[in-house]
Image (cartoon, rainbow, N blue to C red):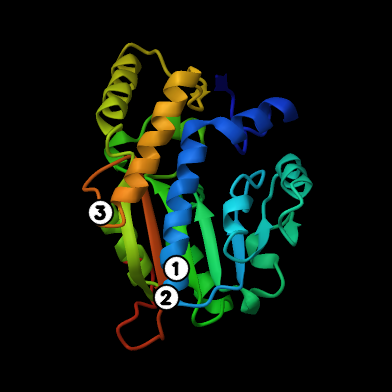
Amino acid sequence: MKQDIRDHAFENISEEKAAALEDTLWWLQGRKYIIRNYLQAAIKTKKIEKIMDVGCGSGGNFDVLAEFAKVVAVERSHPLVMRARARGIAEAVYEKDFFDLPDYDKIDLFTLFDVLEHIEYDFEFFKKIKQIAPPNHMLLLSVPACQFLYSDHDRLLHHYRRYSRKTLHALLRDNGYEITRSSYFMFFLFPFALFSRFKEKVMRLFKKKQTSVNVGEVPNWLNRILTKILDMESRFSRHFSFPIGLWIFVLAKSTTPDHRMHTGPDPRG
């Protein structure tokens, strides 16, 4: 399925279609395997009683988050907030800016799944989180990987950038976070994505720009295979990190500020 994008890939499709996709689409279901795996690692590091899902969309990850702690969430899109609330899982789903919320001091873990690439000033974003969040909080986030893959697909989704694991680690460390665990994912699908992005770039040379986003809907048999691949990668990631992929997941914990923490402007310029 191809869909014109405003704020979110599923925002402008019907409730029935959105629900069907969110319950079956391979990369959304595969992401849950990875999230569960990383949350299992998180609870070994600290006690987690409350999770805030930042940019929660329609709440598709609430079920897996709620396996580990109470959930609150924030989302700016009204249609998505209504869908998220209708799930009846989160204690609260706020329709406002993240930095206008109450009770940050009660949050043990902040999650940002495919959110950071939509934030223009990511360094300042984390700097503000450090100022309002409890001193021992954790972060679990995912971002699209490999800036050289940036294409019309990203522009249509309003992405400012893609990340490497090195740049993402530096961003977090410069804002006072210690990396607990991280890896690329979609390693086995990377060659296919590389071909797809190369094809897009070639088409641009012939003035044929991509004008809609393919959200990844595939035949059922292929959907099952792709979901299993991400499940397998999640299991493998318990033992080693993949060297490349389309996604990066990072689990990080806030450290006590000291003289080594960077407090000036973004060092990346």
- The residue that label 2 is drawn on is 45
Vertical placement of 28 versus 243: above or below?
above
- Residue type at tag 2: Thr
Towards the viewer: 263 or 144: 144
Q: Are marks 1 and 2 in contact (CB under 8 Å)?
A: yes
Looking at the image, residue 91 sits to the left or right of residue 178; the answer is right
- What's the CA distance linking mark 1 and mark 2? 5 Å
- Residue type at tag 3: Ser
Q: Residues within 10 Å of mark 2 (few under 14, many from 20)?
A: few
Looking at the image, residue 223 sits to the left or right of residue 78; the answer is left
Residue 205 spot, x, y in % from top left: 30, 16
Towards the viewer: 26 or 166: 26
- The residue that label 3 is drawn on is 241
The quadrant the C terminus occupies is bottom left
- The residue that label 1 is drawn on is 42
Residue 262 spot, x, y in % from top left: 34, 77
Residue 200 spot, x, y in % from top left: 34, 20
The quadrant the N terminus occupies is top right
Q: Residues within 10 Å of mark 1 (few under 14, many from 20)?
A: many
Tag 1, which secondary structure? helix
